[in-house]
Image (spheres, rainbow, N blue to C red):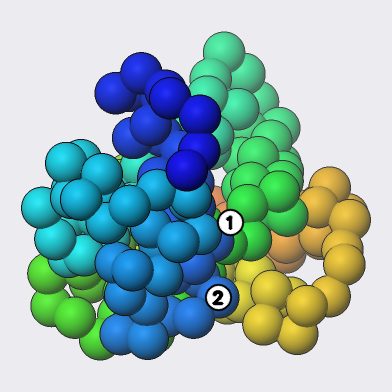
């Protein structure tokens, strides 16, 4: 039996243990007995905090999802340069992945994507990350287009992270972030130039029509 903890401390301990257990064995292969044993508590103690395995898993998704979004949004706050905001946002994200591989696996692994309710929770956090990124895309395009590109950036980051985590590779989070932010920024600059050229062409046509 583990040492007596306050209710809030016990809940946090159970969440930490459950995160590791779910990430390594998967949702369906993990039982409440497995989590109780790993935490050093009896199953009744576990059920005092979470009524079911499903409730526990959902609580974990909420916890790690909020941490991910907060890391990205805080990193870019207070910075006025679009390029610097992009770089810092990528750095915060890849540092989070590097330091929280189990949390990344929980959010983006098969167990969360194959269940409708869990997938909906994950989508809410990816949507939140995209909404945080969208205002940084100052390329003379409308809000809906910004959101579409922001989702593309989120997907690109997730795909790169998935490859690194699934292969168990060690990586420098800042180097990886700088590489992807350079790629994203180059694309956004090209988009901005296209928008500028389009506006110039419209202006030229209007001038010609007036002549």
- The residue at which mark 2 appears reads as 24
Q: In this view, does 93 lie to the left or right of 21?
A: right
The local crowd at label 1, few if under 14, some if 14 to 19, many if 20 or more residues have their Cα within 10 Å, is some
Q: Is residue 94 left or right of residue 138?
A: right
Q: Which of 121 and 195 is in front in this view?
A: 121
Q: Could you tell me residue 171's position as x and y percent?
A: 87, 63
Mark in front: 2 vs 1: 2
Q: Point out which mark residue 69 bears.
A: none
Q: Nearer the viewer, residue 182 or 163?
A: 163
Q: Can residue 196 be seen in this view?
A: no
Could you tell me which residue is drawn at 87 percent across and 67 percent down? Answer: 170
- The residue at which mark 1 appears reads as 188
Q: Which of 99 and 163 is in front in this view?
A: 99
Q: Quick check: 117 above or below 163?
A: above
Could you tell me which residue is drawn at 12 percent across and 69 percent down? Answer: 117
Q: Could you tell me residue 148's position as x and y percent?
A: 33, 63
Q: Is residue 173 visible?
A: yes
Could you tell me which residue is drawn at 33 percent across and 52 percent down? Answer: 42
């Amino acid at each position: 039996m583990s040492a007596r903890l306050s209710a809030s401390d016990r809940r946090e301990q159970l969440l930490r243990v459950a995160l590791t257990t779910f990430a390594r064995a998967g949702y369906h292969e993990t039982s409440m007995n497995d989590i109780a044993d790993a935490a050093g508590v009896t199953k009744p103690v576990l059920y005092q905090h979470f009524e079911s395995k499903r409730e526990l898993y959902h609580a974990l998704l909420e916890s790690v999802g909020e941490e991910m979004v907060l890391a990205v949004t805080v990193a870019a706050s207070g910075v006025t340069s679009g390029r610097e905001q992009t770089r810092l946002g990528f750095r915060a994200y890849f540092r989070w992945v590097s330091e929280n591989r189990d949390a990344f696996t929980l959010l983006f692994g098969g167990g969360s994507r194959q269940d409708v309710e869990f997938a909906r929770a994950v989508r809410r956090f990816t949507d939140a990350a995209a909404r945080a990124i969208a205002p940084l895309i100052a390329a003379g395009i409308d809000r809906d287009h910004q959101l579409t590109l922001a989702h593309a950036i989120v997907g690109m980051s997730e795909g790169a992270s998935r490859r690194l985590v699934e292969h168990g590779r060690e990586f420098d989070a800042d180097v990886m972030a700088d590489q992807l932010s350079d790629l994203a920024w180059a694309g956004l600059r090209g988009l901005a130039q296209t928008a500028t050229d389009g506006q110039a062409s419209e202006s030229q046509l209007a001038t010609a029509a007036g002549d």
